[in-house]
Amino acid sequence: MRVGISLPVRELRDDLGAVKAFAQAADELGYTHLRVPDLVARPKSGHLHEPLVMLAHVAAVVVEIELVPSVIVTPSRQTVLLAKQMASLERLSGGGVRLGVGVGGSEAEYRAQGQEFGTRGARCEEQIELLRVLWTESDVNFEGRWDTVQGTGIDPLPSGPIPIWIGARGLPAPRIRSRIGRQADGWFVLCSPEDFDGLKADIDAAAVDAGRDPAAIGTEAGVALVGPREHEWQDRVLGWREKGLTHLCLRTLGGGLGGDADAHITTARKAFEELQELL
């Protein structure tokens, strides 16, 4: 099981020295990936920098850690531009990138970016298809319902595949479960352990129907290191490992550490040391 950590961007805010220090510490400790959430125009969500710009900043100061924007509200964005941004980030990052995609739930955010809210699920599926074409072909000829790309492409292409993972809160609708099984390289598990087996069974069935190997679809859950459940985190890690998850993401954010970068780093370091014995 690969264990990463979330960058506590809401707490560290504009303290770029703290952001740099946390990212470098996570990289040096041996965390496998670093996750950053998305926000463009969603109201009342607090201070948060655009994730791809933030990760470009981080890419300049880390060496091996994988960078994971998770999840980008993909249908609110222009597909070719997103493909270019991710390809550039992959080139700038020594540890590679993984793209988390989702459809979001804020109609206001879609309106603010001139995109249609009601068709976001279908558009996300088309975007996943187009992104993979744009990342592998220099001259693209693609005609979809929302995007048409004829005789052009992006340059440079990424140096290797960019995995696409799907995120959806709670118990995702059957359409989203099917989307994960048919299209995703993995999914972010945002349900309880009790609900996991049933969801995975539906996703695996959709994968088989699409001619895919369910074992090739990764899974990643999150575990808080601080806050109301901080004394349970080790049991929760072991519980998710027993479920067979391929990835795990630890969190120091949202637990009262505030903007104290040293406290976040100390918590991340202590957890990593304990994980070596636990796992």
Image (spheres, rainbow, N blue to C red):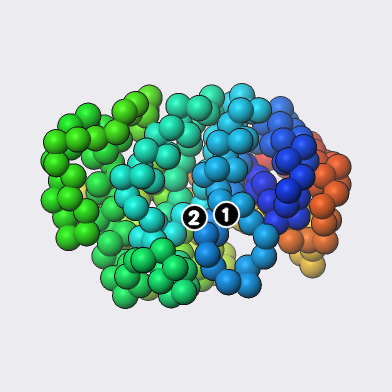
At horizontal 46% and vertical 74% (from top left) the residue drawn is 108
Mark carried by residue 37: 1
Q: Which comes before the other along the chain, label 1 or label 2? A: 1
Q: Nearer the viewer, residue 177 or 114?
A: 114
Between 50 and 169, the residue placed more toward the observer is 50
Q: Position of residue 77 (x, y in %)?
A: 38, 56
Give, as a three-letter code, the residue at label 2.
Val
Q: Is residue 44 above or below residue 216?
A: below
Position of the C terminus by quadrant = top right
* Coordinates of residue 145 in the picture (x, y in percent): 17, 60
Instruction: Using the rendered image of the protein, determine whether residue 248 is visible from the camera's viewpoint.
Output: no
Above or below, 166 against 118 in this view is above
User: Helix, strand, or loop for circle 2?
Assistant: loop
Where's residue 203, x and y in %?
Answer: 35, 60
Q: Amino acid at mark 1?
A: Pro
Query: On the rendered structure, is 7 left or right of 219?
Result: right
Marks 1 and 2 close (CB-CB < 8 Å): yes
The Cα atoms of the two marked residues, 1 and 2, are separated by 6 Å
